[in-house]
Image (cartoon, grey):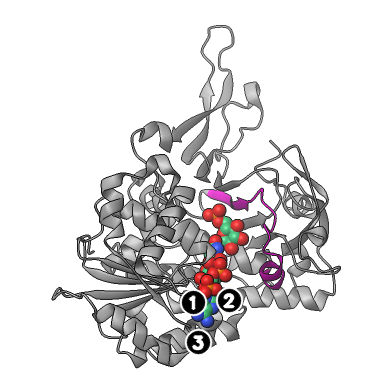
Amino acid sequence: MNTAAVCSDLILFGTAGDLARRKLIPALYQLEKAGLLHKGTRIIGVARESKTAQEYTDWVYAQLEKFVTKEQIDADVWQRFANKLHYCAMDLGDCDSYQQLRQVIDSDADDAERATISYFATPPALFAAICEGLASVALNHESARVVLEKPLGHDLASSQAINQKVAEYFSESQIYRIDHYLGKETVLNLLALRFANSLFTDQWSHDRIDNIQITAAEQVGVEGRWGYYDDAGQLRDMVQNHLLQVLALIAMEPPTRLDAQSIRDEKLKVLRSLRPIDADNVADDSVRGQYTDGFSGDTKVPGYLKEEGAAAQSTTETFVALKAHIDNWRWSGVPFYLRTGKRMPQKRTEVVITFKPQPHNIFHETIGQLPPNRLIIRLQPDEGVEIEMMNKVPGLGQRMQLQPATLNLSFFKAFENKRIADAYERLLLEAIQGNQYLFVHRDEVECAWRWIDGIREAWENSGEAPRGYQAGTWGPAASVTMLAQDGREWDDEI
Ligand SMILES: NC(=O)C1=CN([C@@H]2O[C@H](COP(=O)(O)OP(=O)(O)OC[C@H]3O[C@@H](n4cnc5c(N)ncnc54)[C@H](OP(=O)(O)O)[C@@H]3O)[C@@H](O)[C@H]2O)C=CC1
Ligand SMILES: O=C1O[C@H](COP(=O)(O)O)[C@@H](O)[C@H](O)[C@H]1O
C-alpha cells in the first residue's frame, strides 16, 4: 500500500458548498498540519462565483476560522497551505469552460509528475457533465482519479446510470466512491479487532454468536435539508451505504490481504448473501417510522411534517429498523438487527454482539440463568470497545456470588495523546495516495441498491404509512416488538 506523500493536483468541484466548507477544506488543512501533503500539491477550488486567487485564499481562511477554529490555525501551517490554493470560476454544465480549468492547471506547473484527483462535491446530476468536461481537456489521463460523493443514485437503475457514465471516462481503478463511515477510525478498528486478535477468531460465527445489533441513532432532525431528505429517507440516506458497509465489515470472511481487491471481494460476498426483504417478510422484518413533535434534550422540537420547508403530507421514513439475515455458512440463523433514525434521544453509533449462553451452567444455584457475554463496539461518540462478562464478587460470605462487570477500553484513555482524525482526512489522504481499500466498488453499491429497492417496493406495495414516533424517543414501539417476538431487546432504554 502506498503511504508516501505524493505530488498531486486536487480539484475541488463544489468548493463553495456545505460539504467542502465544513469537511473537505478543514480536512486538507489538517493533512497539511500533519505534514502529509506533498510540498508540490496544488488545491484548485472550483465554483461559479468569480473570485481572484487572493479572494479565494481569504475565503478559505474564513472557513477554517469557522470550522477548525481560530486558535487551532497555526501561522506557518496556514502559510504553507495558502501557497497551495488556486481558484477557477466556471459553470460545470458548460463543456467549453473546462478550458479555463486546463489553463489554471497548466499555469505555474512545475515538471513534477502529478496525479490529478477530482473531488466531485456537487449534486450527482453534474457528475456526467464533469467527467465529459475533464475528458475534453485530457484530465482523464492514466494518473487521474475521481472521488464521488454520495448519494450515488436513488435506486439501482439511477445508480447504474451514474456508474455507467463515469465508466465511459474512467476505469474502476480510477474511481473512488466515498462512504465516509469507512474513514472513521472506529470503523477501521473493526478490521483490527477482528483480524489482529485471535481471541475472537473462533467465536465469530453462528456457533458462538446469538445476534448482532447495529444502531446509528442521530439526535438531529433534517437540519434544513427537508427537500433533499424527503426524496431520500433514512433507508437510502443511511442504510444503503453506512449501515450495510458496517454490516459487511462485521460479517465478511477474513480477506487475504489489506488491499482494496481482497476487502471489497469479501464485503461483496456478504452483500450478495443478504436475504431479500419482500412482500413475504416485510411486515415481520422491517419497521419504518416518522418523527412527530417532541424533544431534543430539553428543547421542544417540531415533527417532521412541521420542519422548515416541509410539505403537508409525506410518507418518507425518518426511522428504519430491519431484521437482516445473511444466508451463508458462517451466519446461518444469526439475525442482524439494524436500526437508524433521526431525532432519537442521543447520537450513538454502535455494534452490539451478543454471544450464545454456555452449554452447561454450574452456577444455577446461585445465579439462575447466566446473562450472555456481549461485545459492544462504540463507533461514536466515546469511541471504544466493551466486553460484558461475569465475575465472582470478592468475599467469603457466599460460596460463589457472580455479578456482570465490564472490561472497558476507551480510545480516549488508551491513546491519550492521539487526536482522532475526521473521516474525511483519512479518505482524502488515501485518495491522494492512490489506495482504494476504503472506497466502495461499483458492484457493492449496486448490490446494496438491489437489496434496498426490494424493501422499498415491499413498503410501497403494503400501502402502509410509516408509524409515528415522538421526537426524542427510540422510534416506534413496533421496533421493540420486532425483537420481542424473537425473545430479544435492543441495547438502549438507558
Ligand atoms: N453537506 C454534507 O454534509 C454532505 C454532502 N454530500 C453530498 O455532497 C454533494 C455536495 O453537497 P453540499 O456541499 O451539501 O451541496 P451544496 O449545494 O452546498 O454545494 C454544491 C456545490 O456545487 C456547486 N455547483 C452546483 N451547480 C454547479 C454548476 N453548474 N457549476 C459549478 N458549480 C456548481 C455549487 O457551486 P455554487 O456555489 O456556484 O452554487 C456548490 O459549491 C452532494 O451530492 C451531497 O449529497 C454527502 C455527504 C454529506
Ligand atoms: O451521510 C450521512 O451521514 C450523516 C451521519 O453521519 P455521522 O458521521 O454524523 O454519523 C447523516 O446525518 C446524513 O443525513 C447522511 O446524509
Residue marked by disc 1 = 48
For mark 1, does the 10 Å Cα neighbourhood hold few (<14), some (14 to 19), or many (20 or more) residues? some
Q: Which residues are magenta?
A: 209-232
For mark 3, does the 10 Å Cα neighbourhood hold few (<14), some (14 to 19), or many (20 or more) residues? some
Which mark's residue is nearer the viewer, 1 or 2?
A: 1
Coordinates of residue 99 in the picture (x, y in percent)? 35, 88
Distance between the alpha carbons at the discs numbered 1 and 3: 10 Å
Residue marked by disc 3 = 93
At label 1, the amino acid type is Arg
Which mark's residue is nearer the viewer, 1 or 3?
A: 1
Query: Is the residue marked 1 within 8 Å of ligand 1, measured from its CB?
Result: yes
The quarter of the picture where residue 363 lies is top right
Query: Is the residue marked 3 within 8 Å of ligand 1, measured from its CB?
Result: yes
Q: Earlier in the sequence, mark 1 or mark 2?
A: 1
Distance between the alpha carbons at the discs numbered 3 and 2: 27 Å
Q: Nearer the viewer, residue 193 or 350?
A: 350
